[in-house]
Image: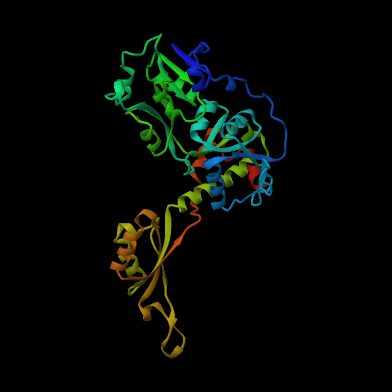
Amino acid sequence: MFALEGKGVGSLLAKDSIPVQIQSLSQRNAADQAPPPTKRTPRTAIRLAVPSKGRMAEDTLQLLKDCQLNVYKPNPRQYIASIQQMPGLEVWFQRASDVVRKLIYGDVDLGIVGYDMYAEIAHGDSGLIVLHDSLGFGKCHLGLGIPTTGKWADINSLDELRGMPDWTETNPLRVVTGYHNVARNFFAQQGFEHVLLLSADGALEAAPLMGTADIILDLVSTGVTLRENNLKEIEGGRIIDSQGVLVANKRALREQPGLLAVVHELIERLEAHLKADKFYSVVANMRGSSPEEVAHKILSSEALRGLQGPTISPVYSMGNGGNGASTAAETGFYACVICVPKSRLYKSVKDLRAIGGSGVLVQPMTYIFDEEPERWQKVLSELDIDSADPLLATMDA
């Protein structure tokens, strides 16, 4: 048996509760069962939907700003904004769940949303494609939270939870969650036979203590909220890792004029910035008799090799008495530029000093543009687009 109670946790406290509705493991929530329109409404503007509220909204706008894409919304009450650097692109502010729904319906072409919401609402919809799966913000995971005391004290794994004799057709495992599609798939795949899914508004963590549910399935970031409510995670109970993702409507990619060019630029900007955000640009003066000698010193330290190796250039200074510039051969100094991972910055500076470096400058990086992004190539592959496709020709028009 697999059941779904469509009421909030508070309603479960009522003496005369509504009988549960029995559903099969493959059924979707009623709100997501309506088929999308078969015909897209013609329009000229390309639409990008982003979350309208909360931390995800703030982080999305900050990421776009970091990529030199400033979202202009003069009136905070507006639902539509623009990006000066990408004319013809409209930014639509929507609830996170509606970002995905409007992608499915074709009302918007692109969307930025948490992967958890995408997995729940899209529910394997083949009409959508994830263009970028790791935007670097909103990191969390969907996981099970079970009580720490009583009969749960010795339950530390999913196998032990499934093996508890308590769960029967008349006494199913009660799971309160806002992710019914994800939960239904997960418990089915894990071989649970008797599960009752409950809905709730507000804090799910209180439900087990109130006796209105046995366990919860919810987003976990640090785990502090679980521990403060006497709940724990168990082995095998981590269901989905989530962070911000960029999603597109496949049909729109083929039919909406200019959309592929926008996607290409977005992916390039995102990839270049997210890569650059992991590094610092480090410049140091190095003593040496030649560029080759300085390069050899630097390359001898693994922490200083950078992306492809150092850039070495001569340092010029005024000659004695101000009579012209002295060359590097005369001063014995060369400037080297390397990219250093942020996590190894201090060790890299110490290594530079140890081989004669001085005057070390550290600068943040905005972009690191490589060759054509791999994610762009994956998009073309999934859409079955090759280099001769007319769609790509329109990108350069």
Does residue 300 appear in this view?
A: yes
The single residue placed furthest to the front in the displayed view is 15
Q: How is the image coloured?
A: rainbow
Could you say where residue 277 lies in the image, as x and y percent from the top left?
46, 52
Image quadrant occupied by the N terminus: top left
Depth check: 234 or 304 in front? 234
Depth check: 385 or 374 in front? 374
Figure check: 191 above or below 56: above
Does residue 376 appear in this view?
A: no
Residue at x 58%, y 35% (from the top left corner): 248
Depth check: 385 or 318 in front? 318
Residue at x 54%, y 40% (from the top left corner): 54
Figure check: 171 above or below 277: above
Res 165 quadrant in image? top left
Could you say where residue 370 lies in the image, as x and y percent from the top left?
48, 51
Could you say where residue 246 lies in the image, as x and y percent from the top left?
54, 39
Residue at x 35%, y 77% (from the top left corner): 332
The single residue placed furthest to the left in the displayed view is 154
The single residue placed furthest to the top in the displayed view is 170
Residue 163 falls left or right of residue 278? left
Q: How many marks?
A: 0
Depth check: 63 or 228 in front? 228
Figure check: 241 above or below 34: below
Residue 157 falls left or right of residue 40? left
Res 326 quadrant in image? bottom left
Could you say where residue 380 lies in the image, as x and y percent from the top left?
55, 37
